[in-house]
Amino acid sequence: MSVLKKIYQSQLFKIISLNSLSIILKIGIGLITSKLLAVFVGPSGMALVGNLRNFMTSLESIGTLGFQNGIVKYTAEIQEDKKQLQQFLATVFISLTGVALFLSGGLYLLSDFLNTTIFGANYEYQLVFKILALALPWYVISIVLISILNGLGNFKNVIGINSIGNSIGLLVSIVFIIKFKTFGALLALVISPALLFFISFYFVNKEIPILKMTNSKDFDYKFLKNLYSYSLMALVSSVLGPLVFLSIRNNVIQTLDINQAGYWETMTRISTYYILFVSTILTVYFLPKLALAKDKFETKNVFWSYYKGILPVFILGVIAVYFSRFFIIKFLFTQEFLPVTTLFFWQLVGDVFKVASLILGYQFFAKKLTVAFIVTELLSLATLYFLSNYLIGFFGIQGIVMAQALDNLIYLVVLMIYFRKSLF
């Protein structure tokens, strides 16, 4: 009993509990959406949705210039200084609104080109990109507003906004997918994030008068310089990563067929759900501890508390997932998706390596090791791209998950060597 009491009173347990409801809601909504996609659009539609999702992830990072973490940091630091906060917010809003409007114009004018690039010449979804052009500025501003709220320390409202946004996204998805099938799924993916603006504006405006604090006279370039390092790291991982996945998926469509690409997208979705638990714990608990670690000894303690506490539980979890794979596919998707069960082994092996490397990768952000992060990230993405294209010729769609497992193992070994003094 004393052991259980100690666990319940620990900081890590409290952090996990605080976020668990939001995570469970998000995963639940994601699973329902996946079921809808499986029933109404099938593997081919799943592949197209995956392509658009990857494109939008890259677009989001470009539209926000990768400023999210920097906005949280500087809002937290200068929130008591109203003049500085006003200058900072004016600089961020003016800069990102300009970027978003420029991107919107490009999306609208290049809708034909983007349709062919993202979906292929056999599909006519140009309207999706035109609607995305109208939605993007609202989407970008909502991300900025949530980052500000996070910086102000109002975590309950941040969780509330995300929960309401996910619920609205589910309703939009249900209506659009049932009514318009694949086209509806693509529209829901584009429209839902923009609706988050109205919720986030309401909550942030209660904290600070946003409209009064975005005067062009307060624009100050020094804040853009301060956000520069955050921008570089975020843009490399959040822009190039999804583009590599998009390229690999398109290669699968051309080399094998679109249904095989849909099976891989399905496996990726399942993986995303259970890794979300680990990534959230890392962000809210381990990242601050790494940032505050004063020497290699303290850093080593953080690393090994993760490896002793989180990694073993995750390994047990993925073993359970592997033996439940047939039930998972039948319950969450349809009989048509049973070929996905052949992808579980290598996906889960790769995910263990990935989760083992996550804590080391977060050290780059904690200590602002920008150059090292960019070099290792580029090497990892290049390895994944070339291994995927090579192994697919020998093993078909299983070659993709094999390539991911090998890439994650190589990345883990490289990081263990780089951080060996703090790790061992």
Image (cartoon, helix red, strand yellow):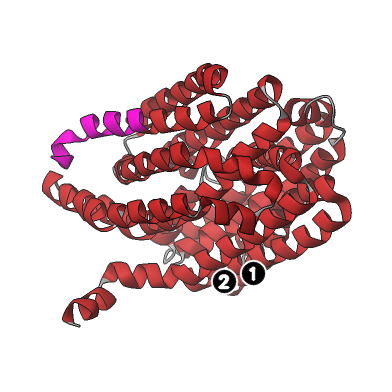
In x, y percent, where is residue 319?
39, 51
Q: Bin the neighbour count of mark 1 within 10 Å (Cα to Cα): few under 14, some 14-19, many 20 and up.
A: some
In x, y percent, where is residue 9?
26, 78
Q: Which residue is drawn at 44% across and 22% down?
A: 383
Q: Give the answer, above or below, for where 246 lies relative to 143.
A: above
Q: Which residue in the protein does label 2 denote?
A: 160
Give left or right: position of 352 versus 392. Answer: left
> Would you say residue 355 is visible in this rendering?
yes
Give left or right: position of 234 versus 265. Answer: left
Of 4 and 164, the residue lying toward us: 4
Give left or right: position of 109 versus 329. Answer: right
For badge 1, the amino acid type reads Ile
For badge 2, the amino acid type reads Gly
> Would you say residue 60 is visible in this rendering?
no
- Residue range in magenta is 409-424
Residue 416 lies within the magenta run: yes
Quadrant position of residue 380: top left
Q: SS of the residue at dot 1?
A: helix
As measured in the structure, the alpha-carbon distance from the residue carrying label 1 to the one carrying label 2 is 6 Å
In the picture as drawn, the residue positioned furthest to the bottom comes out as 1
Q: Which residue is drawn at 14% across and 44% down?
A: 296
Q: Do the residues labelled 1 and 2 touch (CB within 8 Å)?
A: yes
